Amino acid sequence: MPFAPLPLQDWSLDQRRHIVGVFTDIDDTLTSEGHITPPALQALAALKARGLHVIPITGRPVGWSVPFAQAWPVDAIVAENGAVALVGQGVTEACGTASSQASEPQRRYTLDTHTRAKHFQRMQDVLARIEREIPGAHRSQDSQGRETDIAIDHSEFTHLSSAAIDAVVQCMQSEGMTATVSSIHINGWYGQHDKFTGACWITRELLGRDLTQELHRWVYVGDSTNDQIMFQHFEHSVGVANIQRFADQLKHPPRYITPSERGAGFAEVAQALLTI
């Protein structure tokens, strides 16, 4: 499929007025140089104030995501490509299951404890093999906070060639893992979860809603190849402008594209939803 998303301004008012929630990637969608931009943070708050559900969903580890789940005005953060969610105190109370520790988000998992432990050990073996066999390949600096996947850094603090990235992906797949490439990392995991199944799971688990029956009422915002499964499923999908660097790698591009990159682009999506 050719990369030919429509400009964001073509998103019709009639479609926008039916939106009830926003899923969004984090890295290079809300952030720039690893930090959330002020316009993006203000946009999250404005969307929540309007009464929309807001759920970031990321390949980043759950440990890395904790401070953001505590500080950002969101319903939850789904981490590690759909395997685990962090639910803030306010949302937990609203659902009638208040935690006794307001400062620590509640962790919810798609897999049971035994399965996670079994997968974790297998993944450490694959991680060691990748670092041993593929020159320049190193685990991501946020690896210590990962519970259900592994990540190889290709663009955050180091640089891997396209050939090396492909070799990492092939190694993960040869070990029976699912592998995806984000704007900064190559992620691998065992299990059937991904960003879309994670979105469906947390929507059902937290909100009691069947996402598959109301995809036309949600929007997804992303920036990279690992967002394709969301672009494929969501009628209202938006790429921030920096997604253009992956144009030739996208089999499932977003329907719309913002004028601006990263957090400024996300703010433009929010503005489109708020001006109805």
Image: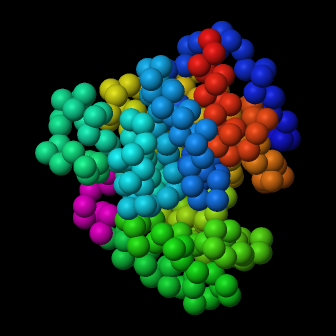
Pick whichever, 107 or 166, lies toward us: 107
Horizontal side of 181 relative to 1 (left or right) equals: left
From which residue to which does the magenta span run? Answer: 109-117
In the orientation shown, which residue stands out farthest toward the front? Answer: 38
Quarter of the image holding residue 206? Answer: top left
Where is residue 129 shown, x and y percent of the image?
A: 54, 85
Residue at 65% in and 30% down: 269
Residue 97 within the magenta-colored segment of the rendering: no
Residue at 17% in and 37% down: 98
Pick whichever, 93 or 117, lies toward us: 93
Pick whichever, 270 or 133, lies toward us: 270
Residue 110 within the magenta-colored segment of the rendering: yes
Horizontal side of 143 relative to 255 (left or right) equals: left
Tell me which colouring the rendered structure shows. rainbow
Where is residue 101 shown, x and y percent of the image?
A: 18, 48
**Quadrant in the picture for the C terminus:** top right
Where is residue 203 shown, x and y percent of the image?
A: 40, 33
Residue at 26% in and 40% down: 89
Is residue 43 depicted above or below 229 in this figure? above
Is residue 79 depicted above or below 181 in this figure? above
Pick whichever, 157 or 196, lies toward us: 157
Where is residue 218 shown, x and y percent of the image?
A: 54, 26
Residue at 80% in and 53% down: 245
Looking at the rendered structure, the number of numbered marks drawn on it comes to 0
In the orientation shown, which residue stands out farthest toward the bottom? Answer: 132
Is residue 232 visible to us here?
A: no
**Quadrant in the picture for the N terminus:** top right
Quarter of the image holding residue 75? Answer: top left
Horizontal side of 17 relative to 85 (left or right) equals: right
Is residue 40 depicted above or below 113 in this figure? above
Is residue 94 visible to us here?
A: yes
